[in-house]
């Protein structure tokens, strides 16, 4: 309704400070792996995230059909292009531990978060 004759935020600039990223060391990851956890899915999915760099949202949606030949295949939301992420030996070991047996598991989620 043109009540305010000008944009009051026109001359406001916000500087974003770059934050320092902190990474877990291999020894810390090893200690986490050896630590007891009441929810095995939560523990394995967190470790898988550490070894792949995937976000929790990506891990929640990850299906067995996306994993082929030691890689995770996914479609970029922005470009719609198909990309792949090679899996480390540690990530492959986690997948081997939770591998599901069945005729058609391609659409099944890798990590079952329904119990959380």
Image (cartoon, grey):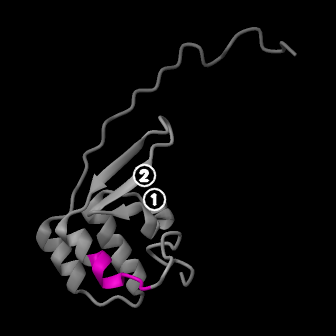
* Nearest the eye: 115 or 11: 115
| Quadrant of the rendering where the N terminus is positioned | top right
Q: Quadrant of residue 96?
A: bottom left
Return the mark for residue 74.
Answer: 2
Which mark is nearer the camera, 1 or 2? 2
Residue at figure coordinates x 17%, y 72% from the top left: 28
Q: Quick check: marks 1 and 2 in contact, CB under 8 Å?
A: yes
In the image, residue 96 lies in the stretch drawn in magenta: yes
Disc 1 crowd rating (10 Å Cα; few below 14, some 14-19, many 20+) is: few
Relative side of 20 to 25, left or right: right
In the image, residue 37 lies in the stretch drawn in magenta: no
Q: Quadrant of residue 30?
A: bottom left
Instruction: From the top left corner, tell me how far across and down residue 59 is, in percent.
Output: 43, 64
Q: Secondary structure at mark 2?
A: strand
Name the residue furthest left. 27
Disc 2 crowd rating (10 Å Cα; few below 14, some 14-19, many 20+) is: some
Relative side of 1 to 90, left or right: right
Residue position for label 1: 58
Check the image and report above or below for 83 versus 3. below
Start-end of magenta stretch: 94-101
Q: Secondary structure at mark 1?
A: helix
Of the numbered discs 1 and 2, the one sitting upstream in the chain is 1
């Amino acid at each position: 309704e043109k009540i305010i004759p000008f944009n009051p935020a026109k001359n406001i600039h916000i500087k974003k400070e770059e934050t320092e990223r902190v990474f877990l060391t291999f020894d810390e990851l090893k200690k986490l792996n050896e630590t007891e956890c009441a929810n095995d899915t939560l523990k394995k999915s967190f470790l898988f995230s550490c070894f792949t760099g995937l976000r929790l949202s990506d891990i929640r949606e990850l299906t067995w059909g996306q994993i082929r030949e030691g890689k995770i295949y996914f479609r970029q939301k922005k470009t719609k292009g198909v990309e792949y992420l090679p899996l480390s030996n540690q990530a492959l070991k986690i997948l081997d531990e939770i591998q599901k047996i069945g005729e058609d598991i391609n659409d099944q989620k890798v990590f079952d978060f329904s119990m959380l």
